[in-house]
Amino acid sequence: MADGGQDLRAWDRAQLLALFDPATGALDRRVLSDEALYQLELERIFARGWNFMCHDSQIPEPGDYFISYIGEDQVIVVRDEEGGVNVLLNTCRHRGNALCRAEQGRAKSFVCSYHGWNYALDGRLIGVPGLKTFYHNDIDRSRLGLARARAENYLGFWFATLATDAPALRDYLGDVGRTGLGMICANGEVEVVDGVQKNVISCNWKIAVDNLFDWYHVPYSHASANTAGFLDIAAIQHPQSQMVMLGEYGHAIGGPGIPRERQDQIDAMSDEERAAASRAAPPNSPRIRPRAARDLMGPVGVRSEGHPNIFPNLWITLGGLQMCLRLPRGPSKTELWWFTFVPKGAPPALRRAMIAQANHVFGPAGILEQDDGENWSQSTRSARGFSSRGLGQYIGMGLGHDQAVAGEDGEHYIESAVGEHGQRWLYRAWTEWMAARDWTELKANHTPPPTGPV
């Protein structure tokens, strides 16, 4: 049954494109509540796109595995005996039982607890109890291996897609996606802290995504953190110095940007001078990135101190200290997974300090996310009301008042005050993904990053 009791009617292309009007910023609230739209998202966004799976450091040895999701399809991400990484649907080909129940571990093969079917680390069916006695050898094991997703790696981050016609991961990420992942690695090699923090919020996954571009809410939603001395809003918001990067297929970065004049000063500094300036800065100030960061993030991206989102649902925050997956669990529920990254081989004291900061800011115990979760759940709840969902949302801040420009390496970005360009880019992309029946149609009809008035 649909969360809001709506009819499970089909949506045609014109209706899907009409759910958000980029010319006015008008968003139909049904995008946060409609069950039929949600089911279409699982097909046309999650099964089609590249989804973050895990980091190399979580599966370092043969047999190491990590359980992840593509939409609501649970998958096993496992390193095989040859060192390759396979992404396998965690469902037995016999009766559909989950093969792997632990969230992370090491295995030599995967055995179904229902009837004992046994699968190799690459998904091949290698054992069937009673093959001769009960099946009379009348079974083609080569056709009953685990279903596989395509898996590719960028900078140690593994992604997977169920679409055979999807572009290569690097092309899918584009400048903005690569900038976001480069932000995590800007200061050197990293590893994931054991223990992914997970919690469920009664909200639609998209509002948990669009909030990461929203620097308008910070002084209001998080006023208690500022009052308690936990957060200095004036030091982090920089409302008049924002930079939004817009990428292919809905990727975007929004938040404070380093002014060009300041970046010119940084470019003239050695890595030693940058490290010294970072140590002398006030507490919680962003660390000045080393010279090598420019190669990872590009000449525009290296000036970003905002939050990237790799479409559809991968948030990178706190300068790369954390990543969050917003996993869909129905139109009105989202499961959040928080990954914390620390420098590889970091001294214990630094490691503890970084983990403490991550735990106290975002995640289930984070002071900021508790504020955000209340807002997201109430906004989602109102989208389910018969009269409320007919009102729409208005996402028009800055619309028509700013300019998008192309950087020297082709990056498209906007420098202005706090606005809602990132949110509009997200929902424009969402409608285009939803309206396209396959990758050929999506490539032909998606909006490229703009230049000029936005």
Image (cartoon, rainbow, N blue to C red):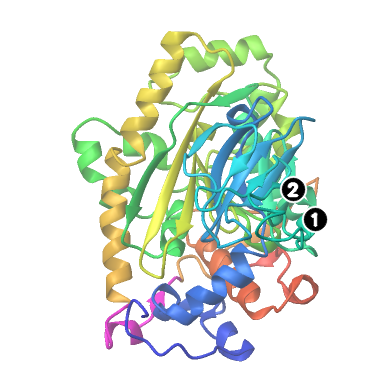
Q: Residues within 10 Å of mark 2 (few under 14, many from 20)?
A: some
Q: Residue at x 71, y 60 (%)?
A: 248
> Which image quadrant: the N terminus?
bottom left
Q: Say left or right for 4 vs 292.
A: left
> Looking at the picture, how far across and down is residue 420, in whole percent?
48, 62
Residue type, numbered disc 1: Ser
Residue sitting at the far front: 133
Q: Is residue 368 above or below residue 12?
A: above
Which is more toward the observer, 161 or 339? 161
> Looking at the picture, how far across and down is residue 37, in whole percent?
50, 78
Q: Residue at x 26, y 65 (%)?
A: 378
Secondary element type, mark 1: helix
Q: Which residue is mark 2?
A: 124
Secondary element type, mark 2: loop
Number of disc labels: 2
Q: Which residue is mark 1?
A: 142
Which is more toward the observer, 281 or 62? 62
Q: Say left or right for 128 vs 282.
A: right
The magenta segment is 384-395
Q: Earlier in the sequence, mark 2 or mark 1?
A: 2
Which of the 4 image quadrants contains residue 143?
bottom right
Q: Residue at x 60, y 57 (%)?
A: 311
> Looking at the picture, how far across and down is residue 437, in whole percent?
70, 79
> Which image quadrant: the C terminus?
bottom right
